[in-house]
Image (cartoon, coloured by chain):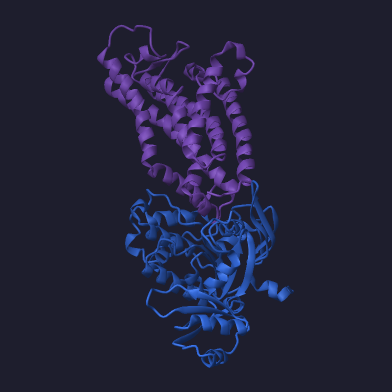
Chain colours: A purple, B blue
Amino acid sequence: MPSSGLFLNELALLFRRRRTWAMLLALGAVPVLIAVAVRLTSGPPSGRGPAFLDQIAGNGLFTAVTGLFVCIPLFLPLTVSVVAGDTIAGEAGAGTLRYLLTSPVSRAKLLAVKYAVAAVFCLSATLMIALSGIGIGAALFSVGPVTLLSGSTISAAAGVGRVGLIALYIALSLLGLAALGLFISTLTDAPVGAMAAVAVLAIVAQILGQLPQLDWLHPWLFTNHWLDFADLLRDPISWSSYGQNALLQGGYLLVFGTLAYGRFASKGIVS
Amino acid sequence: MNATATAKLAIQTTGLGKKFGKRQAVSNLDLAVPHGSVFGFLGPNGSGKTTTIRMLLGLVTPDSGNISLLNKPMPKSAASVLPRVGALIEGPAFYPFLSGRANLVRLDAADRTSTSSTRSNRVEEALEKVGLGKASKLAVHAYSLGMKQRLGIANALLRERELLVLDEPTNGLDPQGTREVRNLVASLATEGTTVFVSSHLLSEIEQMCSHVAVMSLGNLVAQGTLEELRSTGQHRAMLRTPDPNVAIEVFARLGLETKPEPTHEGDCPQLRVVLGSDAQVPERIVEELVRAGVRVRGFVVKDPSLEERFVALTGEGFDLAQ
């Protein structure tokens, strides 16, 4: 963990940006939209729409789960792309990189701090959706004991705990993408280009994941376990997908963290 | 150079070179910046000044040669040397949505060796020194170019520094600001700080610096004290006379080169004479002129100016060097 004032300062900087709050509020609005739509059209479950949607009217906690599920393919990767793509390229584009490095900060430390801040954003984003979902779900629907996918029932408090676990799982799922973003961010001085490239890669990985012809590739895609959080809604919890996902994301962090360092350590700062 | 002289150098480079693609930005540069000097780093746009500064501060890795900053090798010792060096590099750059003060706090916090307990005091002091005390809470996007430049200088002054590297410090400043920077540099120099200033403004350098180096096309073409550089220049004289043709003959006989100076119609014609570095005694020249019947209405001897020396070293014209 990179200690020191730099990390706290960078973290404060992240949450002082209007952009960060705009993204977090947009993410937080997703469960609200879902809940309002379900409330206004409440009728018998149709069986269509995103997973868990039909359970919202029965238990408000499922608003959070549905919200997270809906945000995984596009909204979450998009916001993470913005933050991760901006890490180094944003500083370079603004010219502040030369002053940070001569203040001085070692390049390895700057990368570590920037990545840690991006990781905090991943967690903030998923927690935002979870909290907003729990809040609006409790406001518009009843919250009670949760019936899990395995058929058993747990208390509402334990249900909230499960939602927290899912938020953590998804934040973990995004760490590989954030590492990829950090690397791409060291390649350019144009932050917008880096952000777009990261977002495109997130979409491409998901498309590749849909093609059965590429079965051999799927275990290596950082998106492979993105939707596997349903295992956390069983009793007892099946931790295997958590473990596999952590291993995969860790691998991405190792590879792209190393590449980012290799690139950044020797890069001439001419911006 | 012997050991004691080397120890007194704040910046020393040997054989420093950097290529960007096919363009040789800096080649075989041997800089020697004495400790305690105010060192002017001159050169036309594109002559390699900023690349050199980026190499000195470890932002760009040289292709060849060595750098010693405060007697430590760069970029190897960046972590221990750079806290003792304040820098303004190619203009100020700050986060526009943060206040001037928050920007400085951020940069100071980035330096692991800075003391956090004195941070806010040091930031206030630096802001006061550059006259930004009242604007410190304003977001930087509301700053004028001159205010940003001042904030950049404040950043260089966040701690006690042994060396200041200021790239074009008076860029965008109004005349008062320019004067303040000059005074600031002078007062820092009297406290013993070495100041390395790059500029293409000769008058600035002439007023501030004790030592000068001149770059052209990535090469160092002159280096030394201001006096040394000036004295290698040529003395000139201006002659005002209604008999320019006769005067030219006299000068030719004395082996002196002349050039007619453009004058307004009706004004008395003027001639510019190059006296050479071993200036002939002026009264001898005037005596010859008068003897030949030239009506001398004015004769002024001018000391060599840095500007002429600069143009002689780096070439004339507006074309960018590379």
Q: Is residue A179 visible?
A: yes
**Residue drawn at the location 40% of the way across and 58% of the way down:** B148
- Does A39 sit left or right of A99 as displayed? left
Tell me how many marks there are. 0
- Compared to residue A184, the image places residue A45 above or below, namely above
Q: Nearer the viewer, residue A41 or B162?
A: B162
Q: Nearer the viewer, residue B267 or B223?
A: B267
Q: Nearer the viewer, residue B41 or A37?
A: B41
- Residue B145: quarter of image: bottom left
Which x, y percent locates residue B202? 50, 69
- Compared to residue A261, the image places residue A145 above or below, namely above
- Residue A146: quarter of image: top left
- Does B63 sit left or right of A60 as displayed? right
**Residue drawn at the location 39% of the way across and 27% of the way down:** A130
Q: Is residue A1 visible?
A: no
- Compared to residue A185, the image places residue B305 above or below, namely below
Which x, y percent locates residue B102? 40, 54
Which residue occupies the extreme left position in the image? A40
Q: Quadrant of the N terminus of chain B?
A: bottom right
Which x, y percent locates residue B297? 44, 87
- Residue A248: quarter of image: top right
Which x, y percent locates residue B139? 35, 52
**Residue drawn at the location 60% of the way across and 62% of the way down:** B216
